[in-house]
Image (tube, helix red, strand yellow):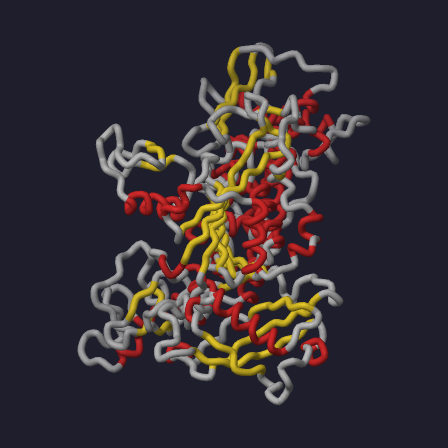
Amino acid sequence: MVVNGRPMKRLVKRRITADISDFLTFPTAGDLASPAAAKPFRAAVRAFLTKHARLPPPSSLFPHLLTWQILFRIGDLAEDDGGPAVVCLDVVEEDVARSRSVYCDQCRVVGWSSNPVTAKRYHFIIKADGNSIDGFNKTCAGCGDALHMSDSRCKSCNHVMTAEDVEDWMYQQLDSTTHLLHGVIHANGYGHLLRVNGREGGSKVLSGRHIMNFWDRLCIMLGVRKVSVMDVSKKSGLEFRLLHSVVKGHPWYGDWGYQFGAGSFSLTLDDYNMAVENLSSLPLSLFQSQGRKPRTRLQDLISFYQSVSEKELLNIRDLFSFLLNLIHDGNRSPLRVDDSPCKKLKNGSRALCSWTIYDIKRVEEAMFKVLRAVSGSAWVSWRALRGAVCRAGTPELLDYCLKEINGKEAAPGMVVAARCISDSGAMEYRLEPGSAPILSSYGPLNRFPMGSHPSNERVLGDLRYLYECMLQPETIVFNMAPAKRNLAVTSATKILDCKQFVKDYHPDHFLPVPKENAVQVLCEVDLMEQPEEYNGQNPPPPELLILPADATIADLKHEAMKAFQEVYLMFRRFQVEELVGYGGVDESTQIRLLLGSSEFVRIRGRFLGKNGVGRYRMERGLERWIVDCFCGAKDDDGERMLACDVCSIWQHTRCCGIPDYEAVPVKFFCHRCRQTRNGQCRGQVYTNKIFVGDIRSRLTDAGIL
């Protein structure tokens, strides 16, 4: 990330003031261990903003969208003027009751739809251009030019800027997909990581790991409870959750403790783990066995990387791990040969593993003989040349020699020429007039390509090709047993259908507070008069109270009521009546004598007034909908659905035989309603393409049923 478009360099003179923290280390271990950090989120976020942030004057224009700014330096990097390179973290405090979007879509699809709507949401944003959301510039709604916040009229198009125009611009910033970081945390400590864009997303300095490390430390400091992320990230144009799961056994976010949260199509954690294991453990020999058929590019690539890997590559996980390591090493500058995962040369014998120099010369002479026998200037393909000398050596040795034969002298005055066919990527060879270059005394083995391993461009191209042939469900090759191919397709599909991952920052619910100084109470609520929408729903998440060591039952009831009123909109008029199970105990009794230092309690109360329940209740919204799909899904999981025109029950379009690329039909009748109807619609999906009898078999083949 370049803050002002100018390149950065190492600091020559350190001119960083003490109040600017380092983005790469903030918050420090000392900050995380301090007593100030041991607070529930609703209190910790206020303390954090008071200590570290500043509230610019223009924020007063929109009191429901207060924007706080915090500047960080980026290590020792500096701008051209010698000042520190800085990054701006915006914290937008959103008043949910006055927001344009009251209900949270992320809560709904991750399984938190029964949580009450919180009073506040906090957006943590780092813009890609390094500027602040609530800086002193805004965009003209008429022509798009940048205007100062105080300007009411655009000088370019004469458009008069209204408060609504500026508010529109603010919400556009919240919805932007270009931010380097965008996380939102509700007042109850439940949050969502919406965006992380590292170098592939436009950052010039900060990598995705830098940003994730900062976000993780920040969540720990703020006492965040749970954070979800919808993993739809791509790496080099590939679905990274599939690629990373095959290589590491978990998504990229799993490196920071994010675990399976919710699967689409009613997939469970066991389904996900089984799919990862089944796909990643498929042996490469399944793709190599082809009988007497001509070898394919896929087989040639597998053989090539097996031949140049220092570690034996046996299954899909081994192969893709090796390729990602090559790409990682290729990004280092400079690359050290000692760090390469490829084979090394043995200095004493000048041999590569079990290959001697005579083995290589024997294979090369066989290839020279074939090329000399070709008439005219015809090109010989990689596959044809390899097949002609297949008995001269092992497949790995053949691949190595084919890679190194270019430019070598095959006859006096004739050298081998090689070219790459752009369409297929395959190599071709022929003899041309010329002389071979003078080699060093170490001979041809010193020209082994892995000394400076294949270029990143080539490895990336091979990675994409192998991904399409071995991992992408729609394009997995057919040259294996049908049962094994179905297993691979089913497993890859299940992995791609698991997008929601969650990190629980406090699985034991309590914070590291010294027991002698405070009492921690996890307080659940029991409503005397439950709203109609709450029937059958889970109660609100319990709120953590940290009370003085001498706090009484009366203090507990007061703090609990205050916490629920502050956090949730529907609890604005909530009043605590009693502590469940301790109704006969005097309220002046110290809670430490009853509960100890850490305990769960339940409070019971009611909503005051005739309309005591707040307007906004649960994150699922006011709509009353029922999900009951073939796959077993009972709630919205973020996948495309449609409702039956008879019973209004929602089902996945994919489970009903309607592909995602097809439009939803104007009329739709679910399986149950079709069985009760007369006429031609009996047993038939409305699209007239897929029959109910086919649906179950297709779902079974796809691993959904």
Q: Visible in this render: residue 245? A: no
- Specify whether 16 is left or right of 1: right
Q: Write the residue at 35% across / 33% down.
A: 148
Residue at the extreme front of the image, as rendered: 588
- Give coordinates of residue 601: x percent, y percent: 61, 78
Foreground residue among 345 and 610 = 610
- Give coordinates of residue 107: x percent, y percent: 45, 62
Q: Visible in this render: residue 226? A: yes
Residue at the extreme bottom of the image, as rendered: 584
The correct choice, above or below, for 191 with respect to 330 in the image is below
- Specify whether 13 is left or right of 101: right
- Give coordinates of residue 270: x percent, y percent: 57, 67
The correct choice, above or below, for 531 with respect to 228 in the image is below
Foreground residue among 464 and 357 = 464
Q: Write the residue at 69% across / 56% down.
A: 35
The correct choice, above or below, for 370 with respect to 638 in the image is above
**Which quadrant, please, contains the C terminus?**
bottom left
The correct choice, above or below, for 390 with respect to 170 in the image is above
Occupied quadrant, residue 339: top right
